[in-house]
Amino acid sequence: MDLLPDTGPPWQAKCWGWTREVPEAPPFFRNDPRLSTWQLFVTAGGFCSVHTHRKTNEFYVESGVVLVQLWINPEDPPGGSVLEPGFGMRVSPGTPHRFCVLESGWLWEQYIPPHGQDKCDPNDIHRMRPGGHLRKPGRRVRPGTDDARPAAFTPEDFLFAAGNP
């Protein structure tokens, strides 16, 4: 069974899984033409870049588990929250952040444009550190198949890359 639906907008491969912008928001997000909504399939061990936006970034976990790290003060270690299915989080504009995938699953993102703008700028991202994918010995992730759900990672697995942005 393929995990990625082959109908709708095309998927983009990322180091942490796959993503695509969707024309309509799911029921837990607002449907507003000014907002940009993305569906993500994230794989355990993946993490996105540490980055900032001028827009607001909201996360919602449909399945799997993710750690969202925030650098409120760039001199301090990151804070963060572990999000399980049914939970979400809002990241304020200008806050350095990233997500780390503890268990594979479905994640949603919605971007809200800065005050006074009608649309989200797709190039509104300032990357400070690259994303990647952790691998543990004996683990394999086969994209788009049922066995793309390896055993869970822990937040401690991502400490190596939790330095300041």
Image (cartoon, helix red, strand yellow):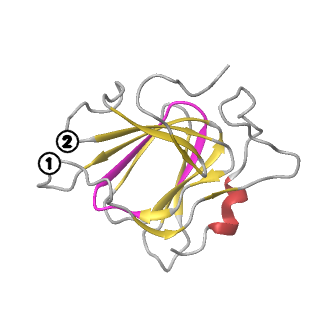
Q: Are marks 2 and 1 in contact (CB under 8 Å)?
A: yes
The earlier-in-sequence mark between 2 and 1 is 2
Outermost residue to the right: 138
Q: Residue at x 52, y 76 (%)?
A: 76
Q: Residue at x 54, y 75 (%)?
A: 164
Most common secondary structure along the magenta stretch: strand
Q: Residue at x 49, y 41 (%)?
A: 19
Q: Quadrant of residue 102?
A: top right
103 falls in the magenta region: no
User: Up-down: is 94 above or below 108?
Assistant: below
61 falls in the magenta region: yes
Q: Quadrant of residue 8?
A: top left
The amino acid sitting under disc 2 is Arg
Task: Identify residue for label 2.
Answer: 34
Q: In what element is the residue under mark 2?
A: loop
Mark on residue 51? none
Q: In what element is the residue under mark 1?
A: loop
Residue in the foreground of this view, choosing between 97 and 20: 20
Q: Is residue 74 left or right of residue 4?
A: left
Q: Is residue 38 left or right of residue 43?
A: left
Q: Where does the magenta region start and end? A: 52-68
The amino acid sitting under disc 1 is Asp
Q: Position of residue 111 (x, y in %)?
A: 32, 47
Task: Identify residue for label 1.
Answer: 118
Quadrant for the N terminus, please.
top right
Outermost residue to the bottom: 75
Q: Position of residue 108 (x, y in %)?
A: 44, 37
Q: Residue at x 20, y 36 (%)?
A: 33
Q: Callout 1: few (<14), some (14-19), or many (20+) C-alpha neighbours within 10 Å?
A: few
| Structural distance between the alpha carbons of marks 2 and 1 | 6 Å
Q: Position of residue 69 (x, y in %)?
A: 52, 58
Q: Is residue 12 left or right of residue 42?
A: left
